[in-house]
Image (cartoon, rainbow, N blue to C red):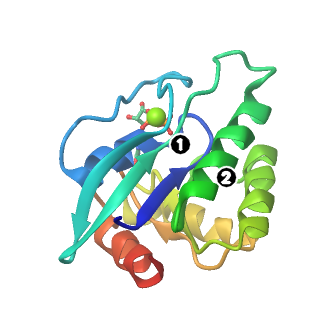
Amino acid sequence: ALPVLAIIGRPNVGKSTLVNRIIGRREAVVEDKPGVTRDRVSYPAEWAGRRFTLVDTGGWEVDVAGMDAKVAEQAEVAIDQADAVIFVVDSSVGQTDTDEQVVRLLRRSGKPIILAANKVDGPGLEADAAALWGLGLGEPVGVSALHGRGIGDLLDAAMAVL
Ligand code: GDP
Ligand code: MG
C-alpha cells in the first residue's frame, strides 16, 4: 500500500484548501465555517515522482462546546493510520489551546510531523509563521494554501520523512 500522509488541524485553518492545492483539483470541500469535512477523506497524490495517499480530516460538529474533543478524536484516528502528519496551524490566529492539545497527541504517536503555518499569504507575514516555533515541533513551514505559496517546500519536507 502507498504511504499515508494525513492533514491534521483545527477547523478553518485551511486543511481542505491545502489538500486541493496538493492534489491539483478542487475535490476537498472548503467552507468559511467549520464543520464541513464530514469524515476522513483519502485522495491519491504525487510529489517529486512519489505516490502517496493524502488524508483530509474533519468530521466534528459545528457545536462549539464539543469541538475540542471532536478535533482531538479525529486527529487521533488519523494520526494512528498515517505514516507522517502535516499539522496545519492558522498563523494569522497563532497557537491555541486546541493546537497544543493536538501537539500532545502528535508527540505521543511518535509519527513524523511537519508543521505547516498556513495563511502566510505574503512575505510580510513570515513573522506569524516564526511565532509557531513556540509549539515545539521544529521549524514552521510558512505556506499559503489559498495562493499556492510555499507548497513545494512543505511537500519536500514531508517526503523527507514519509
Ligand atoms: P479546514 O476547515 O481546515 O478544512 O479549512 P478550509 O480549507 O475549509 O478553509 C477555511 C477558510 O480559510 C476558507 O475560507 C479558506 O478560503 C480560508 N483559507 C484557507 N487557506 C488559506 C490561506 O492560505 N490564506 C487565507 N487568507 N485564507 C485561507
Ligand atoms: Mg476541511
Badge nearest the viewer, 1 or 2: 1
Give the amino acid at mark 2. Gly
Q: Nearer the viewer, residue 74 or 135?
A: 74
Tell me: is circle 1 under 8 Å from ligand 1: yes
Residue 70: % across, % down: 72, 32
Q: Residue at left 55%, top 25%? A: 34
Residue 80: % across, % down: 63, 57
- Horizontal arrangement in the rendering, residue 35 relative to residue 64 (left or right): left
What residue is disc 2 on?
94
Q: Quadrant of residue 152?
A: bottom left
Q: Residue at left 62%, top 56%? A: 79
- Horizontal arrangement in the rendering, residue 46 relative to residue 89 (left or right): left
Mark 1 and mark 2 residues within 8 Å of each other at the beta carbon: no
Q: Nearer the viewer, residue 133 or 47?
A: 47
> Which mark, by number, is residue 13?
1
Q: Earlier in the sequence, mark 1 or mark 2?
A: 1
Residue 154: % across, % down: 39, 70
Q: Residue at left 56%, top 23%? A: 35
Q: Nearer the viewer, residue 76 or 28?
A: 76
Can you say whether 33 is above or below 53 in the image? above
**Residue closest to the far front:** 1
- Horizontal arrangement in the rendering, residue 29 relative to residue 32 (left or right): left
Can you say whether 58 is above or below 137 in the image? above
Q: Quadrant of the C terminus?
A: bottom left
* Callout 2 secondary element: loop
Q: Nearer the viewer, residue 148 or 57?
A: 57
